Amino acid sequence: MVKVFVYGTLKPGEAYYQQYCAGKVISAKRAIAYGELFALPQGYPAMTAGNSPIHGYLLEFSDIAVLRELDELEDYSPSRQISQNLYNRQEIEIFDLEGESLGLAWIYLMTKALVTNLQGVSQTDAWWTGVS
């Protein structure tokens, strides 16, 4: 079982869900991760390390191969330095909407320096959507 917390274009109903997740997801549950959320002018969000609750979905997949596809989408390679990746895949603790731990899940985080360079705007409502 592979767990991935998504907060942007991979959420159900968003731009990349159908292409990368539909038909592969065993379960999708609303969940919370802690960090800071930013809207980027490029049309997608970024999350950095932090202490604010960020709302998204915990997706569960049966095949670990999904991580290779998501790594490619998120421009992440474990063989590159952190500063050379667009996002970096990390495992962090995820919580349900009542604050109970759901265990560890993979998440794609951006460095604060890159968010600043890309002119990210703080998403203080803790929920990003690209759906108009």
Image (tube, helix red, strand yellow):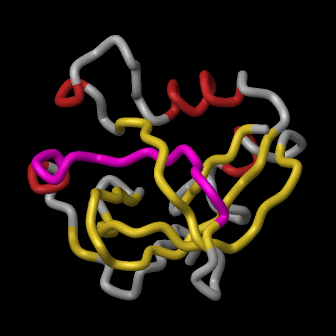
Q: Which of the 4 quarters of the picture holds residue 83?
A: top left
Q: Position of residue 73 (x, y in %)?
A: 52, 32
Question: Would you place residue 112 above or below residue 77 in this image?
Answer: below
Rendered residue at 31%/85% (across/down): 124
Looking at the picture, tell me which residue is in the foreground, 29 or 42: 29
Q: Is residue 110 magenta?
A: yes
Residue at left offset 72%, top offset 22%: 65
Quarter the C terminus occupies: bottom right
Image spot of residue 36 (x, y percent) = 30, 69
User: What is the quadrant of the N terminus in the image?
Assistant: top right
Dominant SS of magenta comes to: strand
Is residue 105 shown left or right of residue 49?
right
Image coordinates for residue 66, horizontal then vertical, percent = 70, 29
Residue range (magenta): 102-114
Q: Is residue 34 left or right of residue 85?
A: right
Q: Position of residue 101 (x, y in %)?
A: 61, 69
